[in-house]
Image: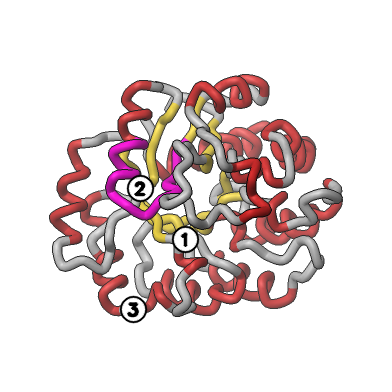
Amino acid sequence: MEKIRIDAHQHFWKYHPARHTWMSDEMEVLKTDLMPPDLLPHLQNCSLDGCVAVQADQSEDENSFLLGLAEKYNFIRGVVGWVDLQAENVEERLAYYQQFPKMKGFRHVLQDETQRDFMLRPAFMRGISFLEKYNYTYDILIFTDQLPYALDFVQQFPTQRFVIDHIAKPNIKAQIMGEWQNYMTKIAASNNVYCKISGLVTEADWKNWKKEDFKAYLDVVVDCFGTDRIMYGSDWGVCQLAATYEAQFEIVNDYFSSFSASAKDQFFGGNAVKFYRLG
């Protein structure tokens, strides 16, 4: 298998206030277009060969937008899109996306659902049950308070490929770990679940974070998931709320500097290639 270095989690968008309602007033820096030519220099600066583009809008129009970019720019190795997993015709929609080789999986913004155990809805789980048949992954985007439900969720689908986005967003700013560590350990016991080491800086103090703030959290994730089920993600451009691309990259690059060459190869690409089956 080709050895490539991958950013397994980043976003593109053409900013539109009605579509990107999650961008609050304190997120002014994000309210601009972020496109592949904007990302490419950062990937090159960090010796990365490609990326996985993840949905930032819950619509199938988003899928068309991202797949169009992936067709135009070869460094976009895969797309994580969105479908209505609760829809009666969800299997028909999954079958439709089989014609696009770069469509690798799907995600729902569970973190924003007022029903915190939304992922346990029977209709939602029915949708999830079809993903494996079509060889699709599922990205779990949650806050820490949803981890107990996520544990139940992943245990219902022991052969579905899951990945937890942004290490489940612990409160790094307040250095709180207890319940987060407890449930991450339990979830990691399911070998079909991976974890993206991404989105760290936005859970820390945006203006005053230090590299040391992240070490305990990284230790837990590596200890739980091992080096064969973790992957690097920048969360660009959301990371710009608290850091440049290069600054957030240096946090993990420094942390993994003492690891073996093979462990670094896995984290910075090999595991993403395996999980998403990137070409």
Q: In this view, does 16 lie above or below 131?
A: above
Question: 171 and 161: which one is in front?
Answer: 171
Q: Is residue 3 left or right of residue 44?
A: left
Judge whether residue 64 is colored magenta. Answer: yes
Sequence order check, earlier mark of 2 and 1: 2
Q: Looking at the picture, which amino acid does disc 2 mark?
A: Gly
Q: In this view, does 220 lie above or below 134?
A: below
Crowdedness near tag 3: few (<14), some (14–19) or many (≥20) residues, C-alpha within 10 Å: few
Question: 215 and 207: which one is in front?
Answer: 207
Position of residue 127 measured from the top left corner of the image (x, y, whole percent): 26, 66
Q: Distance between the residues labelled 2 and 1?
A: 12 Å
Crowdedness near tag 1: few (<14), some (14–19) or many (≥20) residues, C-alpha within 10 Å: many
Quarter of the image with the N terminus is top left
- Is residue 166 at least partly visible in the picture? yes
Q: How far apart are marks 3 and 2 (CA)?
A: 20 Å
From the image, tell me which residue sits under label 3: 121
Q: Looking at the picture, which amino acid does disc 3 mark?
A: Arg
Q: In this view, does 62 lie to the left or right of 175?
A: left
Res. 235 image quadrant: top right
Sequence order check, earlier mark of 3 and 2: 2
Q: Is residue 261 left or right of residue 251?
A: left
Magenta residues, as a range?
52-66
Res. 249 image quadrant: top right
Q: Looking at the picture, which amino acid does disc 1 mark?
A: Ile
Residue visible at 54% across and 79% down? 148
From the image, tell me which residue sits under label 2: 81
Residue visible at 81% across and 67% down? 174
Question: 123 and 157: which one is in front?
Answer: 123
